[in-house]
Amino acid sequence: MKQRQFGFSYAPTSVNEAKGVTINRVIGGERVAIFDPFILLDHASIAAGSEVVGFKRHPHRGIETLSFVISGEVGHKDSNGNEGTVGPDGSQWMTAGNGIYHEEMLIPGPEGAEFLQLWFSLPQDQKRIPSGYAGAQADTIPTVEVEGAKVAVVAGEFQGKSGVFPAIAVRPTVLDIAIDPSATVEIPTIVGEAAFAYVVRGAVTIGEGSATAPSVVFLTDGDLLTLTAKEDGARVFYVSAKPLNEPILQYRSFVMNTVEDIQETVAMIQDGTFAKY
């Protein structure tokens, strides 16, 4: 087995994009703009007692998104007529495809509301597929208990359990890993896939490196990842997928392949044909 090693790590950067929402940008910011096929990872939250706030109606094209709720609730509404609200440890998947308008609102609970949102670039031959949405509450997400850890399989596979969103085009592995204090867990990984671990809580060691929440660790290649929690335990969001190795051009919330694609998208917005089929 070839161990994935600690490559490099950093803390996310605070950005101001939604009034009343604290947003820490993990991927898509000043340090790593794109990690093929990952375009963005945001860690967003509001405090307990806050009003319901979030991301008002806005467009997307050429991506899929996966949102994972840590606390409180996240509500979704889109131009296809889909609506849904997901609670703690639940997840939402959206295909923007050829175009969608949507909004996401954070609904605070006793601990406020907190969620992670990950953007995947769609492959070039699927940029114009129809848009869609699905939500999954915590009790529908498979979990695996191993010695010293509990692993929720949000997407992909782990120990024979498959995630609830099998149709994501880049076929990622997304695991929510809760590690007991001072425990070690081994995660089989696929050679050749881009992979990172976002430390949401606590602290972990990976080979010769260590990271304390909130921080992201970009991993070297290999077929096994070994995570060891420090004395307070840890919660880690592990993500991997095969790179698309295609041109990727991002303009605001649109992720396409060429300048002409972006021109087409802007024209669709202007002439009113965007998000209409």
Image (tube, helix red, strand yellow):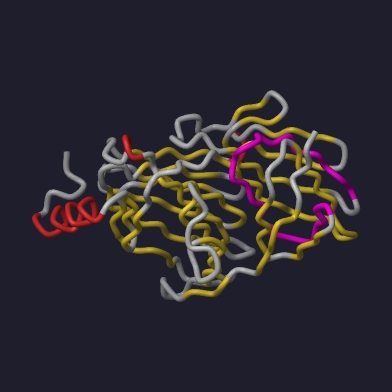
Q: Quadrant of residue 94?
A: top left
Which residue is depicted at the point 87% across and 37% down? 147
Q: Quadrant of the N terminus?
A: top right
Q: Is residue 24 above or below residue 105?
A: below
Which residue is depicted at the point 18% across and 58% down? 266
The magenta stretch spans residue 197: yes
Between 102 and 260, the residue placed more toward the observer is 260
The magenta stretch spans residue 259: no
Between 223 and 216, the residue placed more toward the observer is 223
Q: Quadrant of residue 245?
A: top left
Which residue is depicted at the point 33% across and 63% down? 252
The part of the chain drawn in magenta is 183-207
Q: Is residue 130 above or below residue 238?
A: above
Q: Quadrant of the C terminus?
A: top left
Q: Main secondary structure of the magenta part?
A: strand
Left/right of residue 234 with respect to residue 17 in the rendered view:
right
Left/right of residue 72 with respect to residue 84 in the rendered view:
right
Q: Quadrant of residue 184?
A: top right
Between 255 and 277, the residue placed more toward the observer is 255
Residue 99 position, x and y percent, is: 26, 47
Number of labels in the image equals 0
- Which residue lies most toward the left here? 271
Q: Is residue 151 above or below residue 198?
A: above
Residue 121 position, x and y percent, is: 41, 46
Residue 255 position, x and y percent, is: 34, 53
Residue 108 position, x and y percent, is: 54, 63
Q: Is residue 103 above or below residue 183?
A: below
